Structure formats: C-alpha cells, structure tokens
Image (tube, helix red, strand yellow):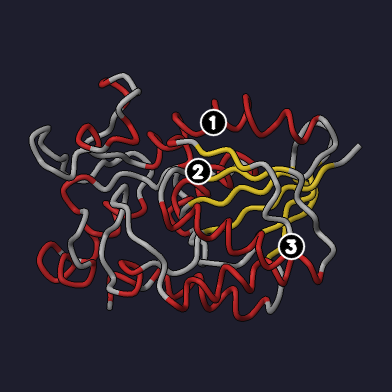
Amino acid sequence: MSGTLVLLRHGQSVWNLQNLFTGWTDVDLTEQGEAEAISAGALLTAEHIVPDEVFTSVLTRATRTANLALDEMGMTWLPVARSWRLNERHYGALQGLNKKETADEYGEEQVLIWRRSYDVRPPALQREDERHPRHDARYASLAPDVLPASECLADVVERMLPYWHDAIVPVLADGKIPMVVAHGNSLRALVKHLDGISEGEIVGLNIPTGIPLVYELDSAFQPIASRYLGDQEAAEAAAEAVANQARG
C-alpha cells in the first residue's frame, strides 16, 4: 500500500513582498499570493490529485491559500482542520523587521543563523510585547508554557510532529490524501522528518510559495518519491529567491 501527501506553502503574503520577518504575525496574501493559490489548485486538478482532507495553520495566509486552491478545484466542501502546530516558526523580536536591513546591521551570516539554523533561536519577545501570542485571542485556550516568544526549527519540529502523527498520518492510514497548507518553516520541519535531512543540511532547504509539493509514501509512511508540480525550473528559481531574501 502506498499513499499520497500534498504539501503547499501559502501564496506570497504582504510581508513576503515587503521582505519582512513574519512568523506568527497574521498578514494576508498579496494579489500575486492569491494567484499562486489559485494556480496550485489548477495544478492539482491537472494532475488529477484530489485531496480528501485539508490541514492548515490558524494564520490567515495559510487558511486563505487553502480556500482559494479548493475553490479553484471546486472542492470548498472538503473538511479543513486548523492547528497552531502548523504555524510558521515564531521569529521572536525579529518579527516585522526587514530581512535585508537586519542583515546590513548584524551581518548576513548572523541573519542566516537566525533564519535557517536548526537550533539557534532569534532574540525573544518580552511577554509585555503586543506581538507576543498571549495577546492573540486565537491562542487563548492554550497553556501559557506552550506559547513561544521565539523559536528555532528544532522547536517547530517538536510541536509539529505530534500533529503529524496524531492527525495527518491516520488520514494516510485510511488510504486518503491529506493536503497540508502551511508555512516555509513548518513545512521544512515536516520535510526534514520525511526525508531524514540532517540538522546541518536543513539550512540549505528553501520551500517556494504556492507550488504543491507531492510525496508518494510507502506503507510505513516513508517517501518513495517527491516532486513539485508544474515547471521544475520555476520551482527551483522560486526556492532560490527565498534563499536570497536577506540579500534583498
């Protein structure tokens, strides 16, 4: 028995366009981001890949991407589960800062460590800072000790994997196709787990916005193959653009 898994990073957001650290800040899609989400639905339709259930974060850019893709597929009726465990990595006090300007101030090497290292957290938010998730109603039911003031990728892996095993794997075990619409780092965390990428190598992995990444999995939910849908060169170029954000 094998299964199919669809991963989709949300379309370009307003802060992606402005080259700002976003994290848990709730920003919307740009017009290009909306077009990317619609294109993702069209690519899935063209490949006859039909998801059975959808999983998103609780952030607008992911939920709207899922809605637009499903609308394009004529499948807005599909069940959608939302969880904070699929949220983007929390960038702490970097949230809202321009990546290029931050690199100019602290150096590209330091910003690369903050953006992509596995176990180094950016500077943390103070609890009184209005950007701290304890001030956001969507997290009011969560225990205070699970709300991050800053995260490294290892933290995202730790909070994401229980949701993968408890919510998404059972869908695969039922022979259904789950589609996970999330963020650059929550998807990097999942890809690290699926592909067995080392802590050192994960620094070089970048996921483009709005292009479905499809995995074929074996009966143990291990990857047999994976590919981006559509133009492969365009996907590679988009991933390279993500890597170069700190250079402006």
Q: Residue at x 30, y 39 (%)?
A: 151
- Look at the picture and state if 210 lies above or below 6: below
Mark 2 touching mark 1, by CB under 8 A? yes
Mark linked to residue 8:
none
| Quadrant of the frame with the N terminus | top right
Q: Amino acid at mark 2?
A: Ala
Q: Residue at x 44, y 30 (%)?
A: 159
| Residue annotated with mark 1 | 161
Q: Amino acid at mark 3?
A: Gly
Q: Nearer the viewer, residue 87 or 118?
A: 87
User: Horizontal and vertical percent for residue 202?
Assistant: 48, 50
User: Horizontal and vertical percent for residue 181?
Assistant: 56, 52
Q: Amino acid at mark 1?
A: Leu
Kindly state the secondary structure of the residue where label 3 is placed: loop
Relative to residue 179, is residue 220 drawn left or right?
Answer: right
Kindly state the secondary structure of the residue where label 2 is placed: helix
| Residue annotated with mark 3 | 74
- Look at the picture and state if 31 lies above or below 68: below
Q: Give the quadrant of residue 19.
A: bottom left
Distance Cα–Cα, label 3 vs label 2 = 30 Å
Q: Please tell me how crowded label 2 is: few (under 14), some (14-19), or many (20+) other residues with Cα within 10 Å.
A: many
Q: Residue at x 64, y 68 (%)?
A: 40
User: Horizontal and vertical percent for residue 143?
Assistant: 31, 19
| Residue annotated with mark 2 | 189
Q: Point out the tag, 3 or 2, that comes first from the N-terminus.
A: 3
Mark 3 touching mark 1, by CB under 8 A? no
Distance Cα–Cα, label 3 vs label 1 = 30 Å
Q: Please tell me how crowded label 1 is: few (under 14), some (14-19), or many (20+) other residues with Cα within 10 Å.
A: some
User: Horizontal and vertical percent for residue 75?
Assistant: 73, 56
Q: Point out the tag, 3 or 1, that comes first from the N-terminus.
A: 3
Kindly state the secondary structure of the residue where label 1 is placed: helix
